[in-house]
Image (cartoon, rainbow, N blue to C red):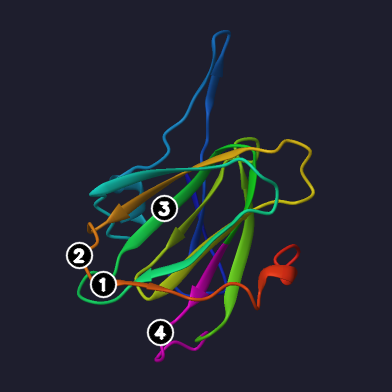
Amino acid sequence: MQITPTPLPGVMLVRVEPAYDERGSFARLGCTATLAQHGINFVPRQTSLSRSRRRGTLRGMHFQIPPSAETKLVQCVAGVILDVALDLRPESSTYRRAFHAELSADNGLGLLIPPGCAHGMCHCPTMLRCSTTSIATMTPRAAAGSAGTIRLSPLSGRWHPL
């Protein structure tokens, strides 16, 4: 795994490094030891699967408030998604700024989103294929009443490119 910082503190691009042989490939989607070497304490407690059947499907922006704020590692295993992290930490120098990356099985990119950031994704409208599948691994498990959502309708026409 390669870990690359983004302009938002704590938001990281995570690139899987598959091993190839005559059967195909194998790659770690996550490794707590590798993340720890980069100063990231990530102990997953929940893994979720998201499937979208239509181009332009929006999901997010979702976040958890303390004490249930969570870290997410989002990866796309089929199709292409535009994945977005929005900094909601008032003390951050990047408060209210967003970072986005195109995630796909082909490019092997994932996005690590720390506590205090909202997360959203859009099935890329330029793709001919009309289905995507993504995996989000999170810690800790969200507590009842701790979820927040930012209304997307004002943003919906500006998602690609953001």
Residue position for label 4: 89
Q: Is residue 109 visible?
A: yes
Residue position for label 3: 73
**Which mark is drawn over residue 143?**
2
Left or right of residue 39: residue 25: right
Disc 2 and disc 1 in contact, CB within 8 angstroms: yes
Disc 1 and disc 3 in contact, CB within 8 angstroms: no
**Which mark is drawn over residue 7?**
none
Q: Residue at x 28, y 70 (%)?
A: 69
Q: Quadrant of residue 90?
A: bottom left
The three-letter amino acid code for the residue at tag 2 is Ala
CA distance for labels 2 and 4:
20 Å
Which of the marked residues, 4 or 1, is nearer the chain's N terminus? Answer: 4
CA distance for labels 3 and 2:
18 Å
Pinpoint residue 63: horizontal percent, then vertical percent: 38, 70
Left or right of residue 111: residue 116: left
Which of the marked residues, 3 or 2, is nearer the chain's N terminus? Answer: 3
The three-letter amino acid code for the residue at tag 4 is Arg
Disc 3 and disc 2 in contact, CB within 8 angstroms: no
Which of the marked residues, 1 or 3, is nearer the chain's N terminus? Answer: 3
Quarter holding the C terminus is bottom right
| Badge 4 element | loop
Which of the marked residues, 2 or 4, is nearer the chain's N terminus? Answer: 4
Residue position for label 1: 146
Q: Is residue 39 visible?
A: no
| Badge 1 element | loop
Which of the marked residues, 4 or 3, is nearer the chain's N terminus? Answer: 3
Disc 4 and disc 1 in contact, CB within 8 angstroms: no
CA distance for labels 1 and 3:
19 Å
**Magenta-highlighted residues:** 84-94
Q: Residues within 10 Å of mark 2 (few under 14, many from 20)?
A: few
Pinpoint residue 122: horizontal percent, then vertical percent: 62, 56
